[in-house]
């Protein structure tokens, strides 16, 4: 069980880094991000996560903000996995 939590935590960290990289390329491309092949690759890799977040969030959330909401949700998933990892590693006293 511990190894499953560790792998899931690593996947969450990887997806967050992809989303942050996509945001950084967006900022550095000065409005031409759709023509940037690196941005398109990062958008392709993060599309399953942003699509799932789009389905979960209400329609009030603008599509432009979905990646930021995804990072926020992934952060809390990461915190939950970290707590699970610590609880699985520390033996229960009693």
Image (cartoon, rainbow, N blue to C red):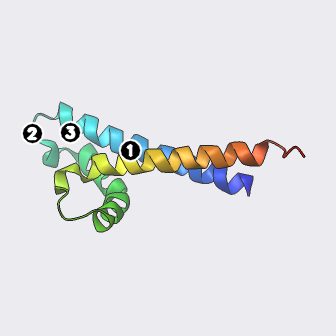
Q: Residue at the front extreme?
A: 94
Specify whether residue 75 is in view: yes
Residue visible at 53% across and 51% down in the picture: 11
Q: Position of residue 37 (x, y in %)?
A: 23, 47
Sooner in the amino-acid sequence: mark 2 or mark 3: 3
The residue shown at (20%, 39%) is: 26
> Can you identify the residue that label 3 sits on?
26
Query: Residue 58, labelled with which disc?
Result: none
Q: In this view, does 25 lie above or below 14?
A: above
Give the secondary structure at mark 3: helix
* Residue 42 visible: no
Measure the alpha-carbon separation of dots 1 and 2: 19 Å
Q: Which mark is residue 31?
A: 2
Neighbours of disc 3 within 10 Å: few (<14), some (14-19), many (20+): some
Q: Residue 18 — which label?
A: 1
Q: Which of 50 and 88 is in front in this view?
A: 88
Q: How crowded is mark 1: few (under 14 residues within 10 Å), some or many (20 or more)?
A: some
Locate residue 47, reporting x and y percent.
32, 59
What is the residue that sits farthest to the right in this orientation?
A: 94
Is 24 left or right of 64, judged from the image as shown? right
Say if mark 1 contacts mark 3, CB within 8 Å. no
Sooner in the amino-acid sequence: mark 1 or mark 2: 1
What residue sits 90% from the left and 46% below the top? 94
Q: Is residue 82 left or right of residue 1?
A: left
Q: Quadrant of the N terminus?
A: bottom right
Rounded to the nearest whole Å, what is the CA distance between mark 1 and mark 3? 12 Å
* Badge 1 or badge 3: first in the primary sequence: 1
Residue 46 in the image: above or below residue 23: below
Q: In this view, does 13 lie to the left or right of 39?
A: right
What SS does tag 2 mark?
loop
| Residue closest to the far top | 28
Q: Residue at x 19, y 44 (%)?
A: 36
């Amino acid at each position: 069980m511990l190894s499953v939590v560790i792998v899931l935590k690593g996947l969450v960290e990887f997806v967050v880094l992809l989303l942050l990289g996509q945001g950084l390329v967006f900022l550095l491309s000065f409005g031409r991000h759709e023509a940037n092949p690196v941005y398109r690759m990062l958008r392709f890799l993060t599309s399953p996560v942003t699509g799932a977040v789009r389905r979960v969030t209400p329609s009030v959330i603008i599509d432009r903000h979905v990646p930021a909401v995804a990072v926020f949700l992934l952060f809390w998933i990461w915190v939950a996995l970290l707590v699970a990892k610590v609880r699985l590693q520390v033996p229960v006293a009693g």
